[in-house]
Every structure is written in structure tokens, then in C-alpha cells.
Amino acid sequence: MLSININYDSQDTSKGSNGQLKDVAGLNGSPISVMPGFPDLEDQFNQMGITHIRLHDAYGVGDLDNGLIAGIGGNNDQMIPNVPRNEVTRARNFIANFSNVRTIYPNAATGMSQGNYDLAFSNSNYEITDDYIRRIMNNNASVNPQGINREVLFRIGRTIDGGPDLPANFDIYVTLVATLVQRYSAQLNMSGIPRKIAYWEIWNEPDLPFFWNSSDPNRYYDFYSKIAWKIKEIDPSARVGGAGVAAGYNPGSAYLDGLLSFCRSNNVPLDFLSWHYYANTTSDPQNVIDIGNNIQNTLQRYGFGNAESLCTEWNSTPQASVNVFSKVQSAQNAAYIASSLIYMQSTKVDRAYYYRGDALTFGLFNDEANPVDPNFKSFCTYSAQAFAMFNQLKQTPNLLMTSDTFTTGISILAGKSGNTVKILVANYRIDRSLSQPNTPPPSGRLYRQHYVDSGRDVAQMTDDWSVQHYFGGKNPATLQNNDVVNRQSLAPQIPNNAELTPRSRNYGESSGGVTLNVTNLSQNVESLETRRLTEGADLSGILAPIIQNVSFRMNGATCVITDPGAVESSVTLYTLTLGNTPPNNNNPNNPNNPVNPINPGNPVNPGNPVLPGGGVVGGGFRFFGTGTIATAPVILIPGQIVPANVTVTTGSRWVLDVTFLDSWISNFGGASPGSPFTADVLSWAGRGSTRIVILLTFNRSGPLRNLLAQTRAGVNISVVPSGSFTFTVAMLLSPLS
């Protein structure tokens, strides 16, 4: 078991943004379904806490000049593997037609090839993209109780397989872009979106010929500079950048060093450098640190030290197959995701966008039933839960100093705010099979996926709902597309100058769970909530379920959490709530070695029938002892903990805080018959928890010790002990002020 120290009194300014959590949990894809057959996910995106969307591969939405051709383009196959075999041909045709007719400028390619501005602008489909951006940003209030404001990064270019050849006329293309910047940044009344788009990424993966079919990087430099200057002319505050390179780690390459050198020499604006990282060659999430450090050094070398570093695509693999689509939704990949998000806090990554976040291929949602209860329909995945758990840290954004765990399988991030500490722990072992398309999941079971519904031709989707949902109110039967142009042979791909390698790990300790030592606490820990995702666990909610068998104990100013369940391919979120009293040794929650508050040198011994207490602790009376549930689940309150001179009056209220040190609570039944008080729950996490706080209201007056000494004067609490019919219990009885 790996022991990790977390210093509550020390902010780690080397992580995040000067010690503040960076919001790196953005997504590619849309919470609004981009194609029939896939669900809307507005509620789910909000539950995950997603605030940043990259508008890319949305199949027409945000695309300037798509020209998909059915069956042409190897990456088109990422949409096909889940389609039934007898529907593949029809699905290919539907995907191409659906994407092309939703393109913003359906005649752009023809107009550019003829040098005709009017033709390039003809039959523009602004309404479709307007509507999607508006819905993404407005964020339906009925499923947005947190009031999340979503921001959109606009990728200038095409959807995957939309055509590899360069725009035929850069000047016309710049004018097309300028119209969109006016619409989405300068004059929002044109589109009706609630706030402007601030980030504009110029093209996608120009280092791959099937996205940018040229072996001359100067063509991209020219293209980038024309667009960047035009965007800044219209909106000087806009953030512009590129190139969204596929090879994020390629020191000295034409689309990293070369682009920066060009921009420096020609005074071309560049507010961010964007890059991608798919870990199919190493399966190591720590490699994102290697890339981030290299990007930072490169930016500084060319005088762009203040520019941002944006990872606009990342995943464990880019290789599409039915095996991959299940593996990227597994608990194993969830641990990879959480580890990556944690490691991004330790390097130059200002924003990141996972590919992808919706229910399409590589996505975070599928068509499976819940693994715990097959009768419950749930299309959430463990990877979606990983994002939700990471975004819980936004509630505690002040990052704390932790032990170095980089040489183990554990990644950890801890933060605090107010009286709350949250700790995220991911346990991931490097496994190259995770990213290999021909290797099935370890279980051999494939998750059921959504797939495109091509039952109707696009021109037949004229029902009111489809017209509004997919076409911005335009009748699809009237939409045409003429952007398919003759395709040239692909140019040679530029070489990679370096290869990443996995970092060395020792899994000896980390494979057995963790012990977390939260040191230098200024307040006592009142409670611990633990949530965990692991393969086969509950998927009925976006946030992983609460588990009950994790212990903590106070050791002076240190809270010790012992968790042997934080094993490989798991992600665990611990939430500590601090109280108003200074730290002491008297607040255990199922500890391994509870302390006797009356005699700290003598630990509680479950073999002793009673360890009588006495004295006053923090204004209350505390007791440690053992009991039996062999005959009844009534927990008696020992009278000897109360001094003889304490009296109560009718109606007086006292708080009884009960913690079971080696058992958990299965039921609460109120006061036992004949008790001089009624008992009501003030705080209880429910079945499986170890602590319950009860309000006692006395219905008669008298010496408190005498009242408690009455036969069966107690509360009904059923517990499940770890031993044979015995439990060890701590009680604190305090008058309610």
C-alpha cells in the first residue's frame, strides 16, 4: 500500500495555474446530437461539469466547405464499425450527404475554384451552425442547475474526411471566415448567440496529408497568416492560433517550430499553439508532461512565452475499431483519463479537449444497460464518470502539495476551499493492449454502441422535430451541396523527428491501494465521503457511487485515510469535511486503531465489555466501548460518562454523535421503548455508513445520569459488525446550544 502525504497548509504553486486548478476537461463533440441515432446529452454534459467545447467533427456544423464522398477516406470508417453489416452502404451514403448539406458554404469549393466570390457564398447555411452554437452556449436551464456557461472553440476547416485538398483560393476563403467572425464575435445579433466565440483555431492536423494535402508547409503559413490577420482586424480581442498538429511531440517540425519561426519573422499574431496527443505508441498518460514541457520550451525559444498551449485532441488511441470503442469506455481507460487530467496540471497545458465527449465513436456514452442492474437503462460509461470526478475538484481549486508519486501507478491531485478538501486518486498501470485495435477488451465483452440511423434519406427528414433539431429550421429537401471536387494524390507525410517512450514505473506498492496522510490540519475532520469507479461498478449516475468501507482516523493534526480498495484501473474521489474544533485524536471513522480519549496510551480493546469514560471533551461527554447485538440492536448511552450534577428539563435537546469503529449501520429505528427521550436523525449517510448524529429531545426532567441509567434507555441502531456479534463504538453527547 502506497503512503502519500498531503500538506493542508501548503499550496503547490508548481501545479495548475500558479496553484489554481486548470480547467483542462474540455471535449470535442456536441451535447446536441450531431446525427440521427445518437442521443442529446445536455443533462449529462452538465452533470460531468463540462464548460469547454471544441466544435470539430460535427458533420457539417461549423464546417466551411465539406466534400465527403461515401466510402472514400480511411477515417470515414470510424463511423461504420457499429453499423449492422446490411446497412453499411446506406449508412456511408447518408453520412456523406447529411454532412455535406449542413455545411455552412455548400458552394464554396466550386466558387473558389472559379474565383467567384458570389458563387462561394451562395445558398449559405448559417442557420444550422447558428442553432447548434446557440443551444450549446445557452445551455438549457432545465438541466443546468449549476448555471454552467459553456464556451466554444471554433475550428476553422472541415469535418474528418471532408476533403484533403487545400482551399483553391485563400483570399475567398479568408472572406468566408471573416463573415463567420463577424457573426460569432463582433455582431452577435446576426446569430443570436449569448456571448462571442473567443478562440479560433485555424485548420486541423495539417501535418497529415489527408487533412492538408501539401508537402510544402509554406502553403499553410500563408493560409494561417491571412486568416489570423483578418480575425484580429474584426475582433482584436479574439484568440487565434493553430495548427492542431497530429504529432504534438515532434521537436523542430514544420508545423510547430516552423510556424512559430514564421510568425515571429513576419509579426503574425499567434495567441495559442494547438496540438494533439494520442497515446497509442506508449499508453502512458505521463507522456503528456513530456509534450507539454516541449511545447513550453518551443514557445519560449521563439518569443511566444505568453502564448497558450492547447491540447485540442487527446485519447488513449486514434485507431478506430469495435474493440477500441469498448476499451475507451472502460474503467481502465477512465483511470488513464483521470491520470492524464491530473498530469496536465504539472505541465504547460492551458486547455485540453478530449476526443470525443458524445455518444459517437470514441465517445463517453454508449447504449448499454447498467452492469449492476440490467433492468436499468444507462448509457453512461466509466470514462464519463472520470470527467465528472475530476470536475468535482473545481469546488476546491486551491491545489495542495502532495508526495511525488510519478514513479508509481498512482496519480493524485488534492485541493481545498473553505472547510472542504477533495482528493482525486487514479490508479493506472501501463497496458499497450488498451490502444491496440485488434485486441479485444480483457473481459472479451464489447459494449453495445449507438450508431447512425440511416433509415431515411436526408431529403425525407422533413418532420418538424428533425427540421428544427438538425437543420436549424431549414427544410433539408431544399438543401444542396456542390463542394465535392476532384481529389489529388496524397502528398508525402512529414516525418516525426522523435518518438515518445513510456516512463519507468514501480507498481509494487501502488497496486495494493493507498494510505493518505492529510497533514497540518487546523480543524478536526468531521466526515469523509468516498466515491469510486471500477469495472463492473454502478453506472446509474454520471458521478461514481459512494462506497462505505473506507476508514479514516485523526492522529493529532493529521487525518489518515486507509483505502486498500484504490487498486489498479480505479479512480477514487475523497471529500473531507472539516469541523469547527481544533484537531485531536478523538474523531475516528472506522479506524484501524481507535484511541481511548480518557487514556490515549491505551487503545480501545474490543475484548473489554466496557471502557468507562468520564470528563468533558469539547463541551460534550465522550465514551468509547464495546457492545453486543446478539439480543437486540439497542445502543445504550452509558450514564457514567455524565457527571452526577448534570440535570435536564423537559424539552431540552442534546446531540448524540455515534461512530462504529468496526461495524456499519444498517438501520435506524428511533428511541427504544421506555427511553426518557425521542430520537431523530440529524445526519446519516444511510445504510453502509459508520456514523450517525441523532437529536435527543427529553420528555421528562431529572438528573441526566439517572435518566440514562434506566433499563433500555437508548436508541435503536442496527449494525453489521466485522466480528461475531460485537461492535466497538464511540459516543459524544453534547447539549444543543
Image (cartoon, rainbow, N blue to C red):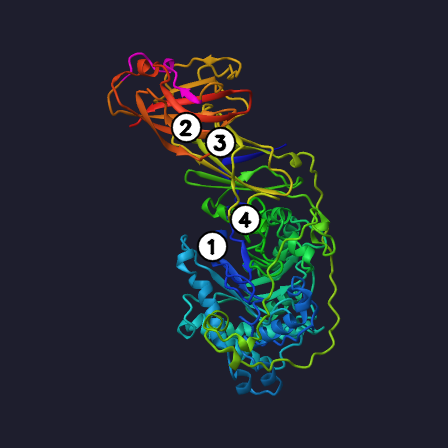
User: Label 1: which residue?
Assistant: 46
Nearer the camera: disc 4 or disc 2? 4
Residue 160: in sight, yes or no?
yes
- Residue 251: mark in rendering: none
Amino acid under disc 2: Pro
Nearer the camera: disc 1 or disc 3? 1
Amino acid under disc 1: Asn
Q: Are marks 2 and 3 in contact (CB under 8 Å)?
A: no
Q: What's the CA distance linking mark 4 and mark 2?
A: 48 Å
Image location of residue 331, percent across then percent down:
62, 46
Image location of residue 221, percent across then percent down:
63, 72
User: Label 2: which residue?
Assistant: 582
- Residue 375: mark in rendering: 4
Q: Are marks 2 and 1 in contact (CB under 8 Å)?
A: no
Which mark is first along the chain, 3 or 2?
3
Image location of residue 159, percent across then percent down:
60, 70
**259 vs 120, nearest the viewer:** 120
**325 vs 419, nearest the viewer:** 325
User: Label 3: which residue?
Assistant: 520
